[in-house]
Amino acid sequence: MKKTLGVFFPLYTTTLLMLLGSGLLTTYISLRLTSIHVTGALIGAIIAANYIGLVIGGKVGHFLIARVGHIRAYVSCAGIITAAVLGHGLTEYIPVWVVLRLIIGLCMMCQFMVLESWLNDQAESNQRGIVFGFYMAATYLGMSLGQVVLMLQTSLGITTLLLIALCFALCLVPIALTTRTNARHMSPAPMELRYFIGAIPKVLATTLVIGMVVGSFYGLAPVYASMQALTTQQTGLFMAISIFAGLVAQFPLSWLSDRYNRTLLMRINAILLIVAALPLALVPHIDFPVLLVVGFIVSMLQFTLYPLVVALANDLIEPERRVSLAACLLMAFGVGASIGPLAVGALIQPLGGNILYAFFSLCGVLLVAFSRTVKEDESQFVQDAPLPHIPLPDSLTSSPLSPALNPTFDEQIIHDTMPPPEAAPDPVDDQPSETPAAEEPIPQGADPDEDTGLKKAHSML
């Protein structure tokens, strides 16, 4: 463990600083726009622009990293984000803020791609779970600390933006000084959206609904808190506790997900979400201590939905299509995270802040309906299904991009999808093999322990 911390400490430090700035920026924008009486629809549009940028960044990032390398791509994106953050202080013209959030989302996805592909490339298969465990801890800790910093602010002025810009500037330092620069070239994950729409339409629809819940929470929960007449400090505490709930929920869920039917777990989770969100949806004003407790429970439930649907999707899809599945799940989640803030933002002004948690309950009803139509028969599950427990905070970090950006997956997918060795040479060496494939139990150059290591890694996460 000490060796892992020492080797990857620069990347963990970079992640913490980057997510500290990102978490603080998301809450700051919502509160700042509410304070100047911007409509909920426009606030939702700005939040949606961030998620649209994240989805677009998945494609742009591959091109940028392949062209200039990991460090240069990260440094350039961090510089652009720092400038965009400061741009919020130059004008309060909302269309400009929409564009700035789009740019920030795009560049942040490129940064996540650098970090996750770097971690995947440098981590051994038997330590990948520990490596990504620390990575997720740094992620949630950074986002929670961002809300704590907000609690220390006396106003929502230029000082907060300077602190955010400072975080994005400082996150350059650890990654620029690291000597581990031999991360390999990445290949874009293939897209087979039409196939998955036909094969697992309800799972994709579930992923989209979950994206609507998570995107709405990060963008509009601060607005809800403001409408509850909470101070900036109380709002920061509410958001910090809610985000920390996401980290707490991952450990029991990882244990349950490996031992019980995931469709049943999804249904139970959705029902509990409906019940837990109802008090915040129906009670106009609620005491602050009660709000913290109920908000913590609701956040635990909503943050455990995405890992379950990713695991379920992988259960239903054969191994050679799982990299493509990762990209499609990311797209479905990103689309949902863009729709949710727009829909709730348009309703929050005329109907009040309680509509946010009413929306969560409604989404829970949809999730229950979808889960009842997903095939539960074990015969439908493919063999050798992985156990990917993937937490997901607001910026899609540790998203399905994690396996898609693992260079060893590209090699494995090529091997799985190539014709039999009788018709083609061994794809791993790019050289003809003198021994027939039928006599080779393990392909040349392959790591026989890699699949087992990946399963352990996902279950530890």
Image (tube, rainbow, N blue to C red):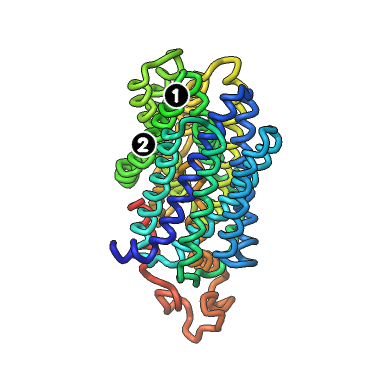
* Vertical relation: 60 (above or below) 256: below
Q: Position of residue 206 (x, y in %)?
A: 51, 36
Query: Would you name the residue on which mark 1 appears?
Result: 231
Q: Are there few (<14), some (14-19), or many (20+) residues within 10 Å of tag 2?
A: many
Q: Is residue 423 left or right of residue 278?
A: right
Q: Are there few (<14), some (14-19), or many (20+) residues within 10 Å of tag 1?
A: few
Q: Is residue 289 left or right of residue 332?
A: left
The three-letter amino acid code for the residue at tag 1 is Thr
The residue shown at (47%, 77%) is: 437
Q: Is residue 282 left or right of residue 75?
A: left
Is any atom of residue 459 visible in this view?
Answer: yes
Q: Position of residue 365 (x, y in %)?
A: 47, 25
The residue shown at (52%, 79%) is: 429
Quadrant housing the N terminus: bottom left
The residue shown at (60%, 55%) is: 79
For this orientation, the residue located farthest to the bottom is: 434
Q: Secondary structure at mark 2?
A: helix
* Vertical relation: 253 (above or below) 319: above
Counting labels gives 2
* Vertical relation: 420 (above or below) 116: below
Q: Say which of 96 and 324 sits in front.
A: 96
Query: Would you name the residue on which mark 2 appears?
Result: 245
The residue shown at (62%, 52%) is: 80
Q: Say which of 417 and 94 sits in front.
A: 94
Q: Say which of 154 and 3 sits in front.
A: 154
Q: Nearer the viewer, mark 1 or mark 2?
A: 1
Is any atom of residue 301 visible in this view?
Answer: no
Between the residue at mark 1 and the residue at mark 2, the CA separation in whole angstroms equals 21 Å
The three-letter amino acid code for the residue at tag 2 is Ala
Question: Which numbered dot is residue 115?
Answer: none
